[in-house]
Amino acid sequence: MFLVGLTGGIASGKSSVSALLRNMGIEIIDADIIAREVVEPGKRAWRKIREEFGDSVFHSDGTLNRSALGQVVFSQQEKRKVLNSITHPEVFKSMFFKAAKLFFSGHQFAVLDVPLLYESGNLCKYVHKTVVVTCSRQAHLVIFGF
């Protein structure tokens, strides 16, 4: 299966490119969506986060309190590394299974939408081509009306 990596910084237009490709019938495996799925109540990463960070980073209904967790991991680099060591393997595993499912259902290629493709480590070695989306400050100001 031919895998294309789609990456870019915050507000670079990556989501717009991804939507354009999806509208053309191209299968997109979105790491951001998967990252939300792997921390749903009862999932392996959810359980590990609860063990490592405690109840204070969860809402009363058991869902992850992203704001509370963010305050912890963005103020303590070691805690951020721990969180990444919990979530990244689960995200990568899910992306692999989604790609395999597409392959076995007859798709010849898919796009992996990964914000930090190269920073995420080994994932970049599985893509055949990489598309980096960028947007100048001037274009960003025009597009978003600033």
Image: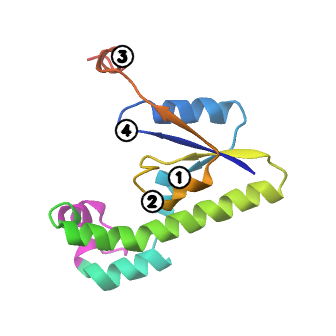
Query: Above or below — where is 35 with respect to 14?
Result: below
Q: Disc 2 marks which amino acid?
A: Gly
> Quadrant of the rendered structure where residue 97 is?
bottom right
N-terminal label among 3 and 2: 2
Q: In what element is the residue under mark 2? A: loop
State the residue position of label 1.
124
Q: Residue at x 22, y 65 (%)?
A: 73
Q: Nearer the viewer, residue 138 or 22?
A: 138
Q: Give the number of the mark in front: 4 or 2.
A: 2
| Quadrant placement of the C terminus | top left
Locate residue 58, reporting x and y percent: 30, 73
N-terminal label among 4 and 3: 4
State the residue position of label 3.
139
Q: Give the number of the mark in front: 4 or 1.
A: 1
Answer left or right for 38 relative to 53: right
Q: Nearer the viewer, residue 146 or 98?
A: 98
Answer left or right for 146 relative to 88: left
Q: In what element is the residue under mark 4? A: loop
Q: Is disc 2 surrounded by few (<14), some (14 to 19) or many (20+) residues within 10 Å? A: few
Locate residue 119, reporting x and y percent: 39, 53
Q: In what element is the residue under mark 1? A: helix
Q: Disc 3 marks which amino acid?
A: Ala
Q: Residue at x 61, y 49 (%)?
A: 127
Q: Is disc 1 surrounded by few (<14), some (14 to 19) or many (20+) residues within 10 Å? A: some
- Asked whether residue 102 appears in the rendered view, the answer is yes
**Badge number at residue 29:** none
The residues tagged by marks 4 and 1 sit, at their Cα atoms, a distance apart of 16 Å
